[in-house]
Image: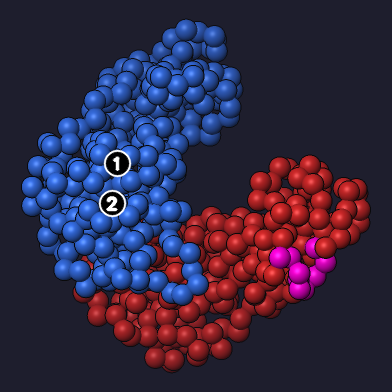
Chain colours: A blue, B red
Amino acid sequence: MIEIDDPADPRLDDFRDLSTADRRPDRPGGRGLVIAEGVVVVERLLASPYPVRALLGVRRRVEALGDGGRDLPAPAYVTSAEVMAEVVGFHLNRGVLAAADRAPRADLADLVASSRRLAVLEGVGDHENLGSLFRNAAALGIDGVVLGPGCSDPLYRRSVRVSMGHVLRVPFASMPDLPAGLELLRANGFTTAALTPRADAVGLADAGLRGRRVAVLLGSEGPGLTDLAIGAADLAVRIPMAGGVDSLNVATAAAIAFYAIA
Amino acid sequence: MIEIDDPADPRLDDFRDLSTADRRPDRPGGRGLVIAEGVVVVERLLASPYPVRALLGVRRRVEALGDGGRDLPAPAYVTSAEVMAEVVGFHLNRGVLAAADRAPRADLADLVASSRRLAVLEGVGDHENLGSLFRNAAALGIDGVVLGPGCSDPLYRRSVRVSMGHVLRVPFASMPDLPAGLELLRANGFTTAALTPRADAVGLADAGLRGRRVAVLLGSEGPGLTDLAIGAADLAVRIPMAGGVDSLNVATAAAIAFYAIA
């Protein structure tokens, strides 16, 4: 633990102007860092494969980590809440942060080969929905998430936070061409089930998915899956819903589907 | 439709300083109004039992309501986005608002007698979680929500918005003494099932709840249900979860339980 009082200290640069620090390096201001906020999420980052660069926090929160703040894998800068707020650019009330480098995404073929249950996303662009979906995937025994076209970056700070750090634990891979990519799943013995509110889809409980190797396809909250994705899946499944109600939030619909195939 | 250009016009008072207008009348600044934001939610308010007092919006959004903005049950004030922002106190990008008076909550005995599936909440104080829970209840066929001790007010603007207006459709009643109140449910033939992560609870799918008259008891996200509430329920049920994961968000857990008993 290293005490720092000067907000301009260059050792704190990883945490400067946090609202852009997590952007991909190809975006304005983006440094591509993975930022974890709060004791629980920082601990998940420490346990993850992402190489931790530094920690920053008030003493009480840093001491709540691991073995009383000892044996951390990177320097832990200790300061006041006021200096933290000045460095990051706004007031944070979680008291501790960690910054890590990105790591390569999982290889799609490896992820598919080693999983029994997968979520395959198309067009899930909302960072909070994406974070919630990872949290639900972690809780409900999904082995990995496959990001099809139009998905946002799960390592944005807001997704990391909303996921409670589970984007750092649940492996994810990219599938740039979704309909074609489903062949890889099929070749590995997966049944691909597209979740959609369409009336002609099979009720989730009647689809016989429980206990099988299943990939659930999920679309964004508004438009849902494309017809192309639904058509390419082995079957279309739906959650029975009351009339006159908009579809569920995508992370909630995903949670029900994950529960139903577990 | 009445054009108004002056943000100080007293006919717009229902929409003035919206950040406090929805507070209960016994709270500072509280007028106890029900505020709906956006076309979808305003339409749910128009279809609800809450007496609409006035609407405020930009012309395009007001004309998206009902029959081209005609036949509205209250005056619709049409103005610019800038005047709206000045009246409400911040920038709104939904373009239309409605204000209504509160109506008495449903009578608990009536709600129980007329329902087959209920959610009973204890200590759900977070307005967003409460709103999401109502949205999930509406989508998944729950007939009503019973608010036990420690629950927040579902008619706060944020709950109304997050619920997509479903707090205005799904009836709710108060149960000030939760363990004692469960007797009323039992007397009406309900099985009361407490949702808890406890290891000795029965798996949700194995509890034989489907098709029965069921009340699901749900606690707040952090502490969950009190031991008193769990002990007073007919059985304790759990969602099977992966190790090392925090419990699910309460609205998500509720959605899974609602799906499982449908």
Which picture quadrant has residue B11?
bottom right
Residue on which the image places disc 1: A148
Q: Nearer the viewer, mark 1 or mark 2?
A: 2
SS assignment at label 2 = helix
The answer to which of marks 1 and 2 sits earlier in the sequence is 1
Q: Determine whether, in the image, residue B125 is placed left or right of residue B137.
A: right
Q: Are marks 1 and 2 in contact (CB under 8 Å)?
A: yes
Q: Residues within 10 Å of mark 1 (few under 14, many from 20)?
A: many
Residue on which the image places disc 2: A229
SS assignment at label 1 = loop
- Please report, as a chain letter, where disc 1 is located: A
Give the residues drawn in magenta, as a range. Answer: B68-76
Image vertical order of residue B124 relative to residue B52, above or below: above
Q: Determine whether, in the image, residue B1 is placed left or right of residue B227.
A: right
Instruction: Name the residue type under label 1.
Output: Gly
| Residue B118 painted magenta | no
Q: Could you tell me what secondary structure mostly forms the magenta stretch?
A: loop
Q: Is residue A141 visible?
A: no
Image vertical order of residue A149 relative to residue A25, above or below: below
- Please report, as a chain letter, where disc 2 is located: A
Q: Determine whether, in the image, residue A182 is placed left or right of residue B29.
A: left
Looking at this view, is A115 or B79 the one in front?
Answer: B79
Instruction: Name the residue type under label 2.
Output: Ala
